[in-house]
Every structure is written in C-alpha cells, then in structure tokens.
Image: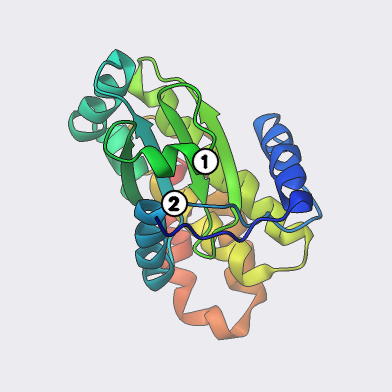
Amino acid sequence: MQVRRIASAASIFLTFSCVLALGTGCSLMAPPPVVEVGPAVDGALTKAHEAARPLLINTTSKWCVPCKAFVRDAETCPTLKQAVSVFERITIDSTEHEVDCYVLHIECFPTFIILSPGGGLLARWHGYKPPPQDMAERLVLELYHAGRAYEMRGQSQQAYELYRLAAEAGQSGPVADSARKAAAELVDFAKASPHKRAEWPIAHRLADRSGD
C-alpha cells in the first residue's frame, strides 16, 4: 500500500515535542512538523489544502462508546457542530483504515489530530466525554494557540486565518475565552494590514458576537 513518507527521525521527535507543548497551551518557535499519513488521510489532506482549512482527524473503533458519543454530539449539539464546521474532517475507523491508524501511531480511541492544510501537526489528544461544549472549547483553544505559534514565527497570514477560524468556531452557544481572544487578534490584524481593509467588517462582526 502506498503511504506518504515525509517524516524524518528528527521531525518525529519534533512531533512529540509539539504535542506536549500544545497540550499545555505553549507556542513553539519551530514550525509544526509535517507528519506521516496513510492513504485515507492523504486524500483528506488534499481536500483540506484545496479548501485552505485545517484537517480534523477523528480516529474511532466500532466498539468505542465515547467515539459514538462524539459523532452524535457533533451533529446534535449546536455549539460543537459550529466548532467542527470550520475544519475539513475525516473519521478513521480502526478496522477499515488499519494503515492510517498504524502510521499515525493510534493506540487509543478516540484520538483527535489537527493538521494544517500543509500537513503540519497543530494538535493531538485523546478521549471524549460530555458535555460537548467542552470539546468545542478545546477545538477553539487549539486553533487559537496554533495561531499564536504562527504569529510568533512571523507568519502573519497563517496566524490571521487560524484566528479567524477560532473566532468562527466559537460563535454558537457559550463562547470560550480563546474565541474572544481570537476575535480581538483578528481585529488587530485587519487594522494593521491595509490589504485586509475589506475584511474589517467581518473581523468586527466576529468580535462583537464573541463578546456576547
């Protein structure tokens, strides 16, 4: 089977370092490492690249009760449904996508992975339990911290897009502090960039809604 092999030993080490840092809300000066993916994720990543959106990978198993709860809540809870809507998404089943689970080193379910449109690791964690609003907040938070990391590296366009997505992800129901911060950063970016003058109304709208 054809597998995209684009991670060196050094990038694998950086992957785990990135996971640890993002899990504690830290930003890294190093760019997110590009990870190795299997055929199913490779196809989804192509769509994410074309749509210029991050990819949310949800790994599941037929016997996994929390996995089924997440799928249900992502469709029925408005807050979580809004949060996941800003991502390109793929569900990887342990039975149907063995190669993908193997190359991603999946050891428990559900495991969630967020990749940039270019395949860089933005976040990785495992487990799901209600209330679904907590998961929505986690998604917003991960986007916000990824935006901060890009901003610290001087990659303003990537940072702007992630702040925008974080603000949009937190527009339904209880809004996380990270969504409000993302909206504020979005306004600052729009004001500081003359070429984004047309996007000022969008930035202010998201900021106003995030302040509710």
Question: Callout 2, which amino acid?
Answer: Gly
Dots 2, 1 in contact, CB < 8 A = yes
| Residue sticking out furthest to the front | 1
- 43 sits to left or right of 161: left
Examine the rendered structure and indicate whether residue 184 appears above or below residue 66.
below
Q: Name the residue under label 1.
A: 104
Q: In which quarter of the image is the N terminus?
A: bottom left
* Direction from residue 23 to residue 168 in the image, left or right: left
Q: Residue at x 30, y 17 (%)?
A: 64
Q: Please tell me which residue is depicted at 58% across the width and 64% down the height of the picture.
A: 160
Q: Residues within 10 Å of mark 2 (few under 14, many from 20)?
A: many
> In whole angstroms, how far apart are the C-alphas of marks 2 and 1?
8 Å
Q: Does residue 171 appear in this view?
A: yes
Q: Which residue shows up at 44% across the image and 51% down it?
A: 38
Q: To which quarter of the image does residue 175 belong?
A: top left
Residue 82: horizontal and vertical position, in percent?
30, 43
User: Mark 2 or 1 closer to N-term?
Assistant: 2
Position of residue 68 relative to residue 183, above or below, is above
Position of residue 64 relative to residue 38, above or below, is above
Q: Quadrant of residue 57?
A: top left
Q: Who is closer to the viewer here, 166 or 44? A: 44
Q: Which element is circle 2 on?
A: loop
* Place of residue 67 in the rendered image (x, y in percent of width and height, measured from the top left): 31, 23
- Along the line of sight, which residue is nearer the eye, 183 or 98? 98
The C terminus - image quarter? top left
Look at the picture and state if 31 lies above or below 105: below
What is the three-letter code of the residue carrying label 1?
Leu
**Residue drawn at x 66%, y 31% as measured from the top left:** 23
Q: Position of residue 56 (x, y in %)?
A: 41, 46
Name the residue beneath numbered marker 2: 38
